Amino acid sequence: MTERDTSSLPSPSWGGAGGGARSERPRAERKGDAVRPAAPTAPSPTLPHEGGGSGHADTAYNFAYLDEQTKRMIRRAILKGIAIPGYQVPFASREMPMPYGWGTGGVQVTAAILGPDDTLKVIDQGSDDTTNAVAIRGFFARTAGVTTTTSTQDATVIQTRHRIPERTLTENQVLVFQVPIPEPLRFLEPRETETRKMHALEEYGIMHVKLYEDIARHGHIATTYAYPVLVDGRYVMDPSPIPKFDNPKMNRSDALMLFGAGREQRIYAIPPHTDVKSLDFEDHPFEVQRFEEPCALCGSTGVYLDEIVTDDKGGRMFVCSDSDLCEEQRAGQPVDA
Amino acid sequence: MYVAVKGGETAIRNAHRLLADERRGDRSVPDITLSQISEQLALAVDRVMAEGSLYDRDLAALAVKQARGDLIEAIFLIRAYRTTLPRFGASEPVDTAAMRIRRRISATYKDLPGGQLLGPTFDYTHRLLEPSLADGNEPPEPETGVATGEAVPRVTDLLGTEGLIEPDPQADPDAEIRDLTREPLEFPADRSLRLQALARGDEGFLLALGYSTQRGYARSHPFVGEIRIGEVEVEVFAEELGFSVPIGRITATECQMVNQFKGSAKAPPQFTRGYGLVFGQSERKAMSMALVERALRWEELGEEQTAPAQDEEFVLSHADNIRATGFVEHLKLPHYVDFQAELELVRRMHAEAKTGDETDGTPRQEAAE
Amino acid sequence: MPHHTSLDNDTPLLRASGVSRFYGSRIGCHDVSFELWPGEVLAIVGESGSGKTTLLNCLSGRLTPTAGVVEYRMRDGTVRGIFSMSEAERRFLARTDWGFVHQDARDGLRMTVSAGGNVGERLMAVGARNYGAIRGEALDWLERVEIAADRVDDRPDTFSGGMRQRLQIARNLVTGPRLVFMDEPTSGLDVSVQARLLDLLRGLVADLGLAAIVVTHDLAVARMISHRLMVMRGGEVIETGLTDQVLDDPRSAYAQLLVASVLQP
């Protein structure tokens, strides 16, 4: 069992609130790479707010770092986002102990929804092993003590940067995206006051102007990532810089998708089973990237591949971007990607 | 056989160990103490407190040490720590007229009640490197005088009694005090939010913007009405007692710019204010803030918007160095998934262009897709 | 001659009543009232500072008047105050049933978007989603404003001043507006280019039955394209009437001076 001993944690930070909204749900079966958090390290004794009546060193910070008031504020923003799919909800983003632009929005959303029974997976570029994914996973292992995993199917919360896992997500999972620039209109109109008005009035003609220009110039739409979508027939939304290959995975997904932009102070959401349509023209329909060869390691097809440069003579190979999928395939496990 | 990259965790751990070692530097040199930083690099500590939005010299000194002297990194450490602190309430407005003055100058009057007091300043020093500092020589004790206890009224108050300067806007005492760190910044921002954003904004950014107003990009004809540096008392209103009680003193720098204003339909020609207030001693920051603050007020004063320093969205969205540094530096995170997508597109378009060349000898205008 | 021959010939297309705009104590325009009928071209003339651009901005909803009402007869026949409708309605009106041709084409065009994209934008804004159809429509409009079809993918920053103005006109007319506002549409162009543009404008206005309000300091421009004329000075309308009448027989001393100061055609 991976149940954490909660008796040593101070009540104010644990209580009911720390458990988040999802703690009563049966925990997913954990296997694969699920690991117990390492022994916590002591915070600096000079910090004045340390303590809280506990002798447990790691609890110098509240469960999942943020205080309960802040988490409630973020949950309100998330709920509003879910109620208005694709709408960017302003929220009072906090200064996090990691730089803006490195996932502070995703981290705050994760912190707000994480419960002690959750199993967390963090990926960057599709991989659990990239440095930023490792750092964020370590942050929650330390501050929340939750079980972490690299297995997509074992995770209840998956925080991601730039990819959606290949394995179809389920209704028991939440995908949290790290978002650098939440405003899909930003590079067409830099002014926030104006873009908010454009959303309010559904003035989205300019989005198609951009696609028109692509076709006029290149013969096809040349946007390859952060490809804008229309959510629930109402709001144009930036899906974060995922490759457009991943866009179809958002449409009518069983999993809840949450987007956090810390620096820009915005949260938005795609509730389960919501229509998500990539913008296009009738005579130039949306298309995803196709790879000509299978993954060189596991042989998967129909998945997103990373190009690995193997020498300086033009040698290269293509391997799965989703490292968990690749490992499972090689281990012979069935995957319903 | 290619094996996917592993071991991010170990690499990070080792990198941080190396960082700790480099931070310590040559171990034959004594470890720098926090009190040395706080006492001898006091202005660095002041800047970290100001832009970190947390008045605590010891923590700021720790941050400077931990950041190896990188002040933006130190500010970042303070900001991240600040997030975890509970917010109990807001203080009463500090009364800078009652400041215990260490330095006070006015450029608008030769002499004035309370006098000009130079205090500890780099002004009028010759910027010549002093070898004696390298030798660790102790400086002579400073000259001291006896405080006269004379009141030191603010220059703007002197102008105010004549009605020549716009009145200081009075906040509605019942209005809730807004807090930039607890609610998202939305535009248009009111003056208090603007001032909060500027007070924690990057000194270099505000300096450059303030400078631009002097060079004609939203010129406001500023005079330094007054700069004062010293200790002010911070009071909080105690509900239980029904009156305010002092909780401590902080050092602050206040700058009141007096700016020309040619009048509008509603107001006769009079002087207007640009305001700067910063934790610790930082005249450069306080002055820059005052210039930019005044420039941002173009709309309420019926002026024309012509320059970057007047553009509220531009200024407030980019003044925060912690956001700026994070987003600039995030470019070093892996982006290979998106790059792959672009690579694929460029390759395809290259191939299409080539096919076009081969078939009809001219670059294709439009591919048939 | 003013066209009073529209289907709804008993109601004006636009009616301004007592429109005033102050900048502090300074007068932008003061107590302006008039009616504009479908298919009618009204020129507002005056020196710079006379308030004609302020008035145009008030009429087109770009500037809120200090006092007065501007009413517009919508396509469904209802008459609406343009400042009492919601901003959403006003913006929709402005990008469908109205056009606005700026003096400087850079204010009215997207300089980094191709000519085709510039013309197509309004169509896409109202839901057109077929690339081929949008492009076809854009090409059709480029032809009507005498821009060669092979420039459809070029950006307006590679166009001459006259071409930019013609492109701006095409961009505005693609949704079939009934009213177009123009702010000094020909100033800054060479005389020969001006003449060609005015000719084109006159043709389009007649073919499409457009109503237009044209601000100009150039009486020759007013004479060439407008049916009716309003002379402004110091924010006030000092003379109004049929264009030929005012220009051939000005009543006010100021209008006489104005007319005398330009060479007669």
Image (tube, rainbow, N blue to C red):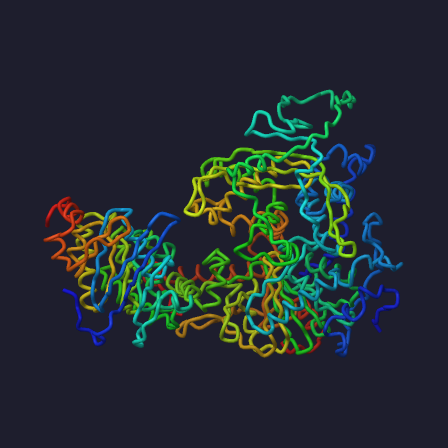
Looking at the rendered image, the quarter that the N terminus of chain C falls into is bottom left
Which sits in the foreground, A55 or A158? A55
- Can you say whether C11 is above or below C16 in the image? below
Q: How many marks?
A: 0
B334 left or right, relative to A34: left
**Residue at image coords 60%, 75%:** A271
Q: Is residue B226 visible?
A: yes
- Residue B281 lies, in percent from the top left, at 68, 36
Which sits in the foreground, A102 or B236? B236
- Residue B364 lies, in percent from the top left, at 35, 61
Q: Quadrant of residue B202?
A: top right
- Residue A155 lies, in percent from the top left, at 72, 72
Which sits in the foreground, A214 or A119? A119
B189 left or right, relative to C97: right
B89 left or right, relative to C253: right
Q: Is residue A299 visible?
A: no
- Residue C47 lies, in percent from the top left, at 24, 47
Which sits in the foreground, B145 or C213? B145
Q: Quadrant of residue A91?
A: bottom right
